[in-house]
Image (tube, rainbow, N blue to C red):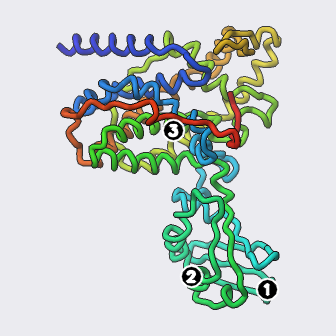
Amino acid sequence: MKKGIFILLTLCLVISVAWIKPEAWGFYGHRLINRMAVFTLPPEMMGFYKKHIEYMTEHAIDPDKRRYATKHEAVRHYIDIDMWDKIPFDNVPRDFEEAIIKHCKIKFIRNNDTLYFDKTITNDTFALRTTAFGGVNLVIEYQLFVKYWKKVIKPMYYKDEWRLSGYDLDELFNTTYFNKNKIDVLIEDHFSEHGIVPYHLESMMYKLTKAFELKDYNAILRHSAEFGHYISDAHVPLHTTKNYNGQLTNQVGIHAFWESRIPELFAENEYDFFVGKAELIENPRNFFWDIITKAHSHLDSVLIVERRLSREFDQDRQFCFDERLNQTIRIQCPEYAEAYTKALGSMVEEQMRSSIHAIGSCLYTCWVNAGQPNLENFKEVTFRSADNEIIPDKNVKTREHE
């Protein structure tokens, strides 16, 4: 009996992998990973997700499409963690608001005069100091400032300007200085621009858990598909570095080479996607940061191996021309790609496998934390095309790595 079930599951997986062909440049891996994650789920969840496996597959790429629709999207896909620290990243706060506080700049504004505070943070205190405007030296308990930030400043996150009136600051620091001198304060976020993916994964886990609690099947599917995208992005070494496309080491194009070209050529026939059952995640925050740490630990190999091979292969053996979306593009030759993936060992395969298992485990954990709602008697979920339409905005600029 068990052998029969194993053969049936194997057949399902083979058919599932074979079904997914590279329809658009850069999307193949996300579709494949999301699709395979469905098969890690327990029977109580499997029926629902298999019923909508085409949605999970196709909408795996929605976050990438949205990168060109809103300026707030791109940073959710990566974190330039080497901007801030080295493994194990002890100097990067795991709490998102504290990370922004640590790296933000706080500016005086009075009429046409502006200048920055000197900001000092310790485990116990938060201090703002300047010798301008008669001098100011304000100190408050750090945790009290964090609490204030989450209540007052956090809701401004998606606004173009984070501005506090003098009254706000006087109330916080128990002073009359700001109002008396007609001073407002502008807060500049210098952390988010370098990526927020581990923090966004926590946000996605919260959203999906709430969707399960409400039995909002449309939201469950939407959040599940998009959660899968961000999780798999976090597994890509080049999503953890300011040298995200090799532009700092004269290796431009390596991002799509590792993330897209290699899986497209080898995943279907050579990779093993039996990753086991989804598991309950006891500490999601640690889980997400472990993903980032492991991905970043591969970065040196990703770059060094490609640089070595580029010296061994002539240019005409490195790059070939292929037809994609009615366009002729320059792309890494299969022979060069094969040499690269062999030199990396099982890295790409293992990161894909880890992505699949992580997605399944996150979906499972959200479901468990929501009280394991019954998904067997779900309604048929239907989506109108307009419900998921993503309209590009020509004014949105994003980092390119295709």
Residue type marked 3: Tyr
Residue under label 3, please give it. 230
- SS label for mark 1: loop
- SS label for mark 3: helix
Estimate the x, y position of residue 173 in percent, counting from the top left. Answer: 59, 84
Residue type marked 1: Phe
Q: Earlier in the sequence, mark 1 or mark 2?
A: 1
Residue occupying the point 20% across, 15% down? 2
Task: Tell me: residue 308, above or below residue 137.
Answer: above
Residue under label 2, please give it. 172
Q: Earlier in the sequence, mark 3 or mark 2?
A: 2
Tell which of 309 and 56 is nearer to you. 56
Residue occupying the point 71% across, 81% down? 183
Quarter the C terminus occupies? top right
Residue under label 1, please give it. 133
- Marks 3 and 2, Cα distance to the nearest angstrom? 36 Å
Neighbours of disc 2 within 10 Å: few (<14), some (14-19), many (20+): few
Q: Earlier in the sequence, mark 3 or mark 1?
A: 1
- SS label for mark 2: helix
Residue occupying the point 67% across, 51% down? 193
Estimate the x, y position of residue 235 in percent, counting from the top left. Answer: 54, 35
- Marks 3 and 1, Cα distance to the nearest angstrom? 46 Å
Estimate the x, y position of residue 320 in percent, counting from the top left. Answer: 74, 10
Quarter the N terminus occupies? top left
110 sits left or right of 356 in the view: right
Residue 357 visible in the current orientation: yes
Neighbours of disc 1 within 10 Å: few (<14), some (14-19), many (20+): few
Residue type marked 2: Leu
